[in-house]
Image (tube, rainbow, N blue to C red):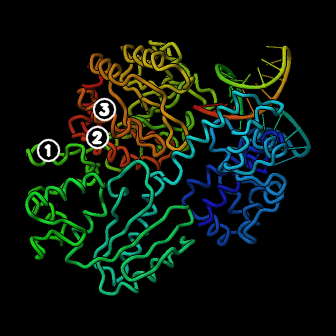
Amino acid sequence: MFNQELSKVFHELATYLKMEGVAFKPYAYSKVALVLETLEEDVGEIYKKEGLTALEKIPGVGKGIAKGIEEYLKTGKIKHYEKLKKKIPVNLEELIAVEGMGPKKIKVLYQKLKIRNLKDLEKAAKSHKIASLFGFEEKTEKNILEGIAFVKRSKGRFLLGNILPKVREIEAELKTLKEVKQISVAGSVRRMRETVGDVDFLVVSKNPQKVMDFFVSLPDVVKIWSKGTTRSSVRMKDGFGMDLRVVPEKSYGSALQYFTGSKEHNIRTRRIAMSKRLKLNEYGVFRNKKQIAGKTEAKVYKAIGLCWIPPEIRENKGEIEAVLEGKLPKFIDCKDIRGDLHSHSTWSDGKSSISEMAEAAKSMGYGYLGISDHTKFLKMVHGLNERRLSLQRKEIEKLNSKFKKQNARFRILQGAETNILDKGTLDIKDQALEKLDYVIAGVHSKFKMKKREVTERIIRAIKNPNVDIIAHLTGRLLKHREAYQIDLDKILRAAKEYNVILEINSFPERLDLNDKNIRRAKEAGVKMVINSDSHHKDYLGYIEFGVAQARRGWVEKKDIINTRPLAKLLTFLKS
DNA sequence: GCTATGGATAGCCTAGCATCCCAATGCTA
């Protein structure tokens, strides 16, 4: 599959052209990079089948870019890109990840100070070489250092949403081996933590050699750290590490429990075992030297007087106590979700039409999909104004009447993701909001306000009688932007009082509310909604990441409003 | 460089904000 590689090349090509001050071309390249990211068919295959003309049928690809793709497929390079890269040979990916660093600054810093990567940048900023440059001053230098610190803090961890699909692919491949009797992923991936350090697989096999041979020769393996018959360790092309362990069948459950963690959870379970004069380790539960459990996790937990605990909550944050008191709730599950209330269409910055989004939602078994396009304050994403909202309404009504004729039990709802302006007002007039099925409000600007100000700003939006949902409450972007400071307790009290729903945004970079805040919201009795925030029909499936965080936040079906069927949901929104 | 319109040429990705430097630039949504 060449799509992702090419997408990256075109993204960088766009950045290089911006450095050169070229107009419009960067936009063309960025656009095509985005298209390639979600293109289902491999461009390599497309080219192989029908050549250049077929490439030109891809949206955003014309003669020039088709030639570029051809060149890349044939030689593994695009000369135009290599030439620009040679001129400014910097680690673009690394530098651009620092908030406040863009093409122009990267160029100047390379030309004046030979800054090529994060390390160079930090060194220069710390020795105050940047502030003395023309066009830079102390404040920029300080911002750069803060940006670097943030990037570093999240370094070495990968987004669950990026890792999980790959993990599943690899798991499926390993499963096809007849030598693999049982397999599971363990560690933080199994606990569905928002970011993941590395990936652990556990396997039961009578022929470990074969399994290991296969594992270390997976196509994306770039480095083999170690290879044995019980453990092998590799690094993948995308930078994350993977371990595979082969364990005896009789210890599979205890090994899975042990390697799933968390460490804190395991310390507790071991102590409990000890208090019962038992020993718990990765090989099993032992009384004296005799193994009394180990084959399955359920048996391991049972042997020490507990019951099986869902991996997502194994953090020693009260799960043990809950089990002992018989009060472990029944957590929400993906199949409980009946619809999605935050999605975008081509009316704003979405990549799929309303109809395509609806069909995709329908095929997921949903009963409804809320289209909530951006509104006018966000010019760049073609945010809708009052007039376009009412035009969009007509399109939605037309599609809904089609569904009705087909007897499909499915409906599109019209929402909008409005913007909370800096004083807490919204960018759409009340009369227009009243006509929508529901209203989402979110902060999309001025992230650096003081804690008290942001809190007041959000609470004012909560008090707006038209607002139903507050989107991505803290505004964080994993690995990129810190959450803005808010007084969560104050906001939770307001949300409860005004019956406003808080969103659990499932987008892998957001996952906002996060697990901790979800749990606090639940404890405060605030209702939540799990939304995908998808900008493409293929991303509706992101909902599973939101559900996972909800589970980590101890959420039950009743806490989440989009577990309700359409009629009940609408009644709730009206109330 | 791509797309749409009309067969070569126009239009596209804008506006607010911070920073730097006191009008302009670069970054971000």
Write down the quadrant of residue A205 in the picture: bottom left
Chain label for disc 2: A
Instruction: Give the image location of residue A29, x and y in percent.
Output: 72, 49
Q: Nearer the viewer, mark 1 or mark 2?
A: 1
Q: Which residue is mark 1?
A: A322
Determine contact: label 1, label 3, CB under 8 Å: no
Q: Secondary structure at mark 1?
A: helix
| Of A475 and A505, the residue lying toward us | A475
Q: CA distance from mark 3 to mark 2?
A: 11 Å
Asked if residue A404 shows in the view, the reply is no
User: What is the quadrant of the N terminus of chain A in the image?
Assistant: bottom right
Instruction: Please determine if labels 1 and 2 lie on a single subunit.
Output: yes
Q: Which residue is mark 3?
A: A528
Asked if residue A501 shows in the view, the reply is yes
Q: How many marks?
A: 3
Query: Does label 1 or label 2 sit earlier along the sequence?
Result: 1
Instruction: Give the image location of residue A158, x and y in percent.
Output: 49, 53
Residue at point 39%, 69% (across, down): A171
Amino acid on which disc 2 is placed:
Gly
Instruction: Give the image location of residue A76, x and y in percent.
Output: 72, 69
| Of A311 and A37, the residue lying toward us | A311
Q: Nearer the viewer, mark 3 or mark 2?
A: 2
Amino acid on which disc 1 is placed:
Ala
Residue at point 33%, 71% (across, down): A202
Q: Which residue is mark 2?
A: A553
Instruction: Give the image location of residue A362, x and y in percent.
Output: 36, 47
Write down the quadrant of residue A401 in the picture: top left
Query: Does label 1 or label 3 sit earlier along the sequence?
Result: 1
Chain label for disc 1: A
Q: Is residue A324 left or right of residue A220?
A: left
Q: Secondary structure at mark 2?
A: loop
